[in-house]
Image (cartoon, helix red, strand yellow):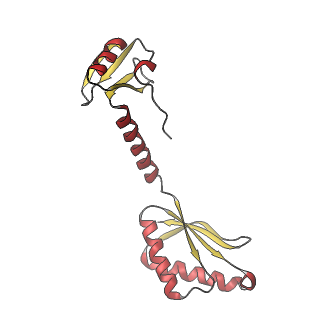
Amino acid sequence: MIKKPLINNQIRDKEVRVIDENGKQLGVVSLEKALQMAKERNLDLIRVTEKVTPPVCKIMDYGKYLYREEKKEKEIKKQKGGEIKGIRLSFAMSSHDLEIRAKQTENFLREGNKIKIEMILKGREKAHEDFAREKIKNFLENLQKLIPVKIEKDLKKEFKGFTMIISKL
C-alpha cells in the first residue's frame, strides 16, 4: 500500500519546488502561489517528496497520481519474482495428466512465479511414500524437458503429504 502524500492545504512548507501537469519545472515559489496556480488549473498540489528542501510538489489530479503510483508499485512487485502458485499432484495421476500439469507449471514459471508442488496422500497412500516420490520425480523430469528449473525448497515430507518449491533457472 502506498503512503498517501499531502495535498493542497495539508502542505505546511513555506516554499515549494513546483512541477506542472506537463512535467515542466516552474521553480521554487511560495506555497500560496503554488496553491493558487493549482486552483487556476482545477488541479491539486501534491507533495511528491519531502526529503529535499524545499520539497517537490506536482500540480496534477490527485486521483490520477494515486492510480499511477499504485500501477508502479504493482510493476515493482512483479519484477521481484511474482507470487507463489500452487500445483497439486495426486497419487493416482496418469502420465498424460502429469504432462499437462507440467505445461501449466511452465506457463507460471515463464510469468516469473515460483511454484509450490504439493502431493496430498490420503489413507493407505501414506504407506507408499516411495511411489509418491517417484511420481514427483517424473513430474520434474517432464518439466525439465520444457523449461530449466531450480529447486528453491527441497522435497519435504509433511503431515498430509509432500511439498517442494521450484522457480525458473
- Total numbered labels placed on residues in the image: 0
The x and y percentages for residue 24 are 24, 27
Q: Position of residue 142 (x, y in %)?
A: 49, 81
Classify 60 as above or below 143: above
Question: Residue at 57% of width from left, 85% of height from top?
Answer: 93
The spot of residue 99 in percent (x, y) is: 48, 82
The residue lying at 64 percent from left, 81 percent from top is 133
Which quadrant of the figure has residue 9? Answer: top left
The answer to whether 19 appears left or right of 125 in the picture is left
Is residue 164 visible to us here?
Answer: yes
Outermost residue toward the front in this view: 42
| 2 on left or right of 165 | left
Q: Relative to 53, is 67 above or below? A: below
Residue at point 52%, 82% (across, down): 98
Up/down of 32 relative to 142, above or below: above
Kindly tell me whether residue 143 is visible in this rendering: no
**89 to the left or right of 13:** right
Q: Residue sitting at 61 percent across and 86 percent down? A: 92
Q: Nearer the viewer, residue 2 or 151?
A: 2
- x, y percent for residue 26: 26, 20
Q: Quadrant of residue 54?
A: top left
Name the image quarter holding residue 63. top left
